[in-house]
């Protein structure tokens, strides 16, 4: 394998990987605050891209993206308020089924609004054939946008959770909801906020990857499954580990092309998921004690 | 007497089944029987899943995978032509034992395929063995992990079906021959055999229901109910929870596989969509709507929803309908549609609203 | 107590179901009786009854890029035909069923259309998998089926009542290989999507390569939902012997592959299948779509055809009508398959009247019927009716489809 080929694979892997990581972080944010796995996470990514594309016909790209992200955040908040807020201690099973139902509904609404066609945002810089040369490999500048924007979001989120009072309140909720409520934190609003945040980062990812991967109404479930796989591999709830796990999965998938037939690339993620769940469900970076303390 | 009381609903079911067939006969609307037959088979999957989810407390988002294992194996074995391999040791051995059958295809070519009974047994056994193998590790998981593991299983089966030339890749398997169950009784989709196939399908449903009813009221059933109620307590009482959970998992997988085999022969084919995630979600939706531990609810909902879906009543909104049903039932009637007491529900919602207000004002003060 | 309540509830629901059924069935019977009476009376008037045409299409679901345009095309055409007095004075009653590319639904709908709606003919389904599942059913019931799916096995072995309108994959491959031979290309890579279409194409490509002196160095299948193919492009690029790439897939992979290849700086010719038949795909591929070579029906270059070309008139009309009726969509060769199916059926009815057997015979004897995919010439052995001349090699230049000239 030549160095250029290696770098090419590496970049392909990092591109997929960071997107999976963002979806996984979206899962983790909601999971941490509520214990719910939001199966509709992939739909937030889809909505971000689709809305931005529609908005783009009236406004320039940056504005279109901002509007799309805001609208998706509103959708996230609405979903939480309409479907989840008023349930009293629902069982895990019930929540799983509800979020699956929500994901189906969002998908069908998207189908009836936008039809089945596949669309894309224009490239932020250049067009479909421009590429920059990095260490011998040629990659599209959009890839750099994806990596850059997503890394920025990850960094931003860690700062948010660590240093802002809102972030600390959310972490308090995640740690112990009762205690947080007693401290005066409005737990219900924290839940809504977590949905808004997850929807927002999902939408940003959806916009920034749209020129490369195209957007269509059915792109949600695949992403959700890969995102969940990454979240589990890293340990549910651990976002830094999710980034590492995401990059890991992306790179494995990219390099697999050199040894396996391409047809098996998608089976890798699912197989990894099953293996991790069977052998080490608390993830590579999680601890089994901590996992058994958590209810799920 | 208890025994008899238990079977009264079954007798009702049988009567209704016969009445419907007679009605369609006399009003010359026998075409309804097609969708009723297909719905019956899907309902067998549903009631098996119902017992797994309701009594075993295990969600399975991959049950369509077992259906597909049954259907695909039966379909592939009974359609792939072994004529070219006639000299091969294994093939000639199977031939001598009588497990292969010669036939002429619709377009005049000679075929040498596996006997449907043998194919059926292989298919169902495979499904059972796979369920046994993965059941152990899967059932140790709980909650979301269990859901995702079953989802992953379903996806892998779907991918295998989609990627293998043996299973027809994206086109699936077509021209699956009829399955002669007993002399004179053939399982096939041809228009002449419609009434007999209707009874075969419903016969299977009745048998499945009786089996499950017996199971629920037996020792195994009681053990399962104790697990569903409080697993640690059950363990403490000496109930071998792992074994019972595995047992019911394998049983529901076998039900799904048998249904798969029969539907494949009835339809004359199977495609990868039968293994897909949406199918599994549908089965779960139907069980949820019917009531997690309510076999009759699941059965009725299975028939009604599948019947309407297969007749195209939902048009392009088919998946959306299932999504809506899932959400609404899970929000308002998590015990299933038969246990709704609307007045009670409204009262509890109002009470909830009031206590929320009280809580918030208490905290603020 | 609970058990009794349960049983009563079950009984009540069952009785309701039976009642609903019987009511439905009885009213249907009563309606039919009324209809027969009415028809008898109407024979005295010169009102001709509608011709019911069923269509099973994958309007939603994974094959919606086929079924969507097909359904819209049929609806548009039927409205047009009925507005102009119908076929021989009969209006067409179009019944579209959305199968979502699910074979079990296709089977159920087929039986419904045959027995309940008693349609005259069935158009579709959109995918080969579904068509193969219902081939035997329609043959057994002697129902005319004009399929919009492409697999060779649909018409080979020939079934009396089953026809198809898309061109043969083997002809597309022959066109591609012919062009490659002219360009002196001998070593290629083949990529295909994991749909039925991709599988069929890959099969033909691998089968016919040696006939044209071409060697397939690498052949890979990828998931149709793949969002990035840069890894496999990198792998292919590393093999310096590859002189061209043939991609047999549907959207979005067609555009994604083109982009990945050009971004990686790989300039070898990229050939696509006739699945590239929508100008939206050029938009999707953008600058990367320049220079893609592929075989297609002449619909995409309708405006640049010679005036005396037998297809030009209807192609231009279809283009204008479709894009006016559906301003958000662009015309595509997929919708064209449905256009051809209905055109053929209508042509046969115009010739032979409303007797099913005679219409079937008429279809088999149709010669020189111009459609979007080409000019159809049917026979008892050929239920597809298109030859290699139905294809034109096209390429993309300055963001438009043009005829390919070396």
Image (tube, rainbow, N blue to C red):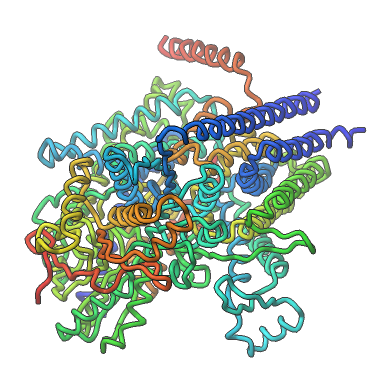
- Camera-side residue of C144 and B155: C144
Q: Is residue A223 above or below residue C220?
A: above
- Camera-side residue of C126 and C45: C45
Left or right: where C66 falls relative to C13: left
Left or right: where C335 falls relative to B186: left
Q: Where is residue A276 in the image (x, y as percent from the top left)?
A: 50, 58
**Residue at 25% over, 59% down:** C372
Q: Which residue lies furthest to the right in this view?
A: B1
Q: In this view, does B254 lie above or below C10?
A: below
Left or right: where A159 falls relative to C109: left
- Camera-side residue of B6 and C213: C213
**Residue at 14% over, 52% down:** A123
Q: Where is residue C124 in the image (x, y as percent from the top left)?
A: 41, 54
Image quadrant where one finds the N terminus of chain B: top right
Q: Position of residue B182 (x, y in %)?
A: 79, 62
**Residue at 34% over, 71% down:** C201
Q: Can residue A201 be seen in this view?
A: no
Image quadrant where one finds the C terminus of chain B: top left
């Amino acid at each position: 394998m030549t160095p250029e080929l290696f770098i090419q694979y590496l970049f392909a892997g990092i591109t997929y990987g960071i997107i999976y990581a963002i979806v996984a972080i979206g899962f983790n944010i909601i999971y941490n605050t509520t214990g719910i796995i939001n199966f509709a996470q992939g739909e937030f990514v889809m909505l971000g891209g689709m809305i931005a594309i529609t908005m783009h016909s009236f406004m320039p790209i940056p504005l279109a993206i901002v509007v799309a992200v805001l609208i998706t955040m509103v959708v996230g908040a609405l979903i939480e308020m309409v479907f989840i807020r008023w349930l009293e201690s629902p069982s895990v099973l019930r929540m799983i089924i509800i979020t699956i139902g929500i994901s189906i509904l969002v998908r069908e609404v998207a189908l009836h609004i936008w039809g089945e066609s596949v669309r894309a945002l224009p490239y932020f810089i250049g067009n479909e054939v421009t590429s920059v040369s990095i260490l011998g490999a040629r990659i599209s500048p959009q890839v750099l946008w994806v990596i850059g924007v997503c890394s920025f979001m990850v960094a931003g989120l860690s700062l948010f959770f660590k240093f802002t009072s809102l972030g600390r309140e959310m972490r308090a909720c995640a740690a112990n909801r009762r205690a947080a409520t007693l401290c005066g934190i409005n737990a219900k609003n924290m839940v809504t906020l977590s949905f808004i945040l997850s929807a927002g980062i999902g939408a940003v990812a959806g916009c920034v990857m749209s020129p490369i991967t195209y957007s269509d109404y059915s792109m949600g479930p695949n992403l959700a499954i890969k995102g969940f796989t990454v979240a589990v591999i890293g340990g549910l709830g651990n976002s830094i580990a999710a980034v590492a796990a995401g990059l890991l999965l992306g790179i494995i998938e990219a390099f697999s092309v050199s040894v396996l037939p391409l047809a098996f690339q998608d089976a890798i993620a699912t197989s990894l998921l099953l293996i991790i769940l069977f052998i080490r469900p608390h993830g590579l970076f999680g601890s089994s004690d901590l996992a058994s303390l958590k209810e799920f | 007497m208890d025994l008899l009381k238990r079977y009264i609903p079954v007798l009702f079911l049988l009567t209704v089944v016969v009445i419907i067939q007679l009605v369609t006969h006399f009003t010359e609307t026998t075409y309804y029987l097609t969708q009723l037959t297909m719905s019956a088979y899907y309902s067998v999957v549903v009631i098996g899943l119902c017992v797994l989810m309701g009594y075993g407390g295990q969600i399975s988002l991959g049950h369509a995978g077992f259906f597909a294992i049954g259907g695909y194996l039966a379909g592939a074995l009974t359609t792939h032509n072994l004529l070219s391999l006639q000299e091969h040791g294994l093939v000639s051995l199977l031939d001598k034992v009588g497990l292969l059958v010669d036939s002429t295809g619709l377009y005049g070519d000679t075929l040498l395929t596996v006997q449907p009974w043998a194919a059926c047994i292989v298919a169902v056994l495979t499904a059972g063995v796979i369920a046994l193998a993965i059941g152990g590790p899967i059932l140790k998981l709980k909650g979301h992990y269990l859901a995702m593991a079953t989802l992953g299983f379903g996806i892998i089966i779907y991918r295998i079906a989609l990627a293998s030339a043996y299973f027809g890749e994206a086109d699936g398997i077509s021209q699956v021959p009829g399955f002669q169950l007993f002399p004179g009784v053939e399982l096939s989709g041809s228009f002449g055999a419609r009434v007999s196939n209707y009874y075969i399908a419903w016969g299977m449903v009745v048998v499945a229901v009786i089996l499950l009813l017996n199971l629920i009221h037996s020792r195994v059933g009681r053990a399962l109910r104790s697990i569903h109620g409080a697993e640690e307590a059950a363990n403490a009482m000496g109930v071998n929870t792992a074994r019972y959970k595995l047992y019911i998992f394998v049983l529901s997988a076998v039900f799904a596989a048998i249904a798969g085999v029969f539907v494949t022969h009835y339809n004359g084919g199977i495609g990868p969509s039968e293994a897909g995630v949406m199918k599994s979600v549908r089965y779960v939706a139907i069980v949820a709507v019917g009531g997690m531990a309510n076999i009759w609810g699941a059965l009725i909902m299975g028939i009604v929803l599948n019947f309407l879906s297969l007749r195209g009543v939902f048009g392009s909104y088919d998946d959306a309908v299932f999504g809506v049903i899932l959400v609404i039932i899970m929000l308002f009637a998590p015990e299933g549609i038969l246990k709704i007491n609307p007045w009670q529900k409204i009262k509890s919602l109002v009470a909830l609203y009031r206590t929320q207000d009280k809580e918030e004002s208490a905290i603020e003060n | 107590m609970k058990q009794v309540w349960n049983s009563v509830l079950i009984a009540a629901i069952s009785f309701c179901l039976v009642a609903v059924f019987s009511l439905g069935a009885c009213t249907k019977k009563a309606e039919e009786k009324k209809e027969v009476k009415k028809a008898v009376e109407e024979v005295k008037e010169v009102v001709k009854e509608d011709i019911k045409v069923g269509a099973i299409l994958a309007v939603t679901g994974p094959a919606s890029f086929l079924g969507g345009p097909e359904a819209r095309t049929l609806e548009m055409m039927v409205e047009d035909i009925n507005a102009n007095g119908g076929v021989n004075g009969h209006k067409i009653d179009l019944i579209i069923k959305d199968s979502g590319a699910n074979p079990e639904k296709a089977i159920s709908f087929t039986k419904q259309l045959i027995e309940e709606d008693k349609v005259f003919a069935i158009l579709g389904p959109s995918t080969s998998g579904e068509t193969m599942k219902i081939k035997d059913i329609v043959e057994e019931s002697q129902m005319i089926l004009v399929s919009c799916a492409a697999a060779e096995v649909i018409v080979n072995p020939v079934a009396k009542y089953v026809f198809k309108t898309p061109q043969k994959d083997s002809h597309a491959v022959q066109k591609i290989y012919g062009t490659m031979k002219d360009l002196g290309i001998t070593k290629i890579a083949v990529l295909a999507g994991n749909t039925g279409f991709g599988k069929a194409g890959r099969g033909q490509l691998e089968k016919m390569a040696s006939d044209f002196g071409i060697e397939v160095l690498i052949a890979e299948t990828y998931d149709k939902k793949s969002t990035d193919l840069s890894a496999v492009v990198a792998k292919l690029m590393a093999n310096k012997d590859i002189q061209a790439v043939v991609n047999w897939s549907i959207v979005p992979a067609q555009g994604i592959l083109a982009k990945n290849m050009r971004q990686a700086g790989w300039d070898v010719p990229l050939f696509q299948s006739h699945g590239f038949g929508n100008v939206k795909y050029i938009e999707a591929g953008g600058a990367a779509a320049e220079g893609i070579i592929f075989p297609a029906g002449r619909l995409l270059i309708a405006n640049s055809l010679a005036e005396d070309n037998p297809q030009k008139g209807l192609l231009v009309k279809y283009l204008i009508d479709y894009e006016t009726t559906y301003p958000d969509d662009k015309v595509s060769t997929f919708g064209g398959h449905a256009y051809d199916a209905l055109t053929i059926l209508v042509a046969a009815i115009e010739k032979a009247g409303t007797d099913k057997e005679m219409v079937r015979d008429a279809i088999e004897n149709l010669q020189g019927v111009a459609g979007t995919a080409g000019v159809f010439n049917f026979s008892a052995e050929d239920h597809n009716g298109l030859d290699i001349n139905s294809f034109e090699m096209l390429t993309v230049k300055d963001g438009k489809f043009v005829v390919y000239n070396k």
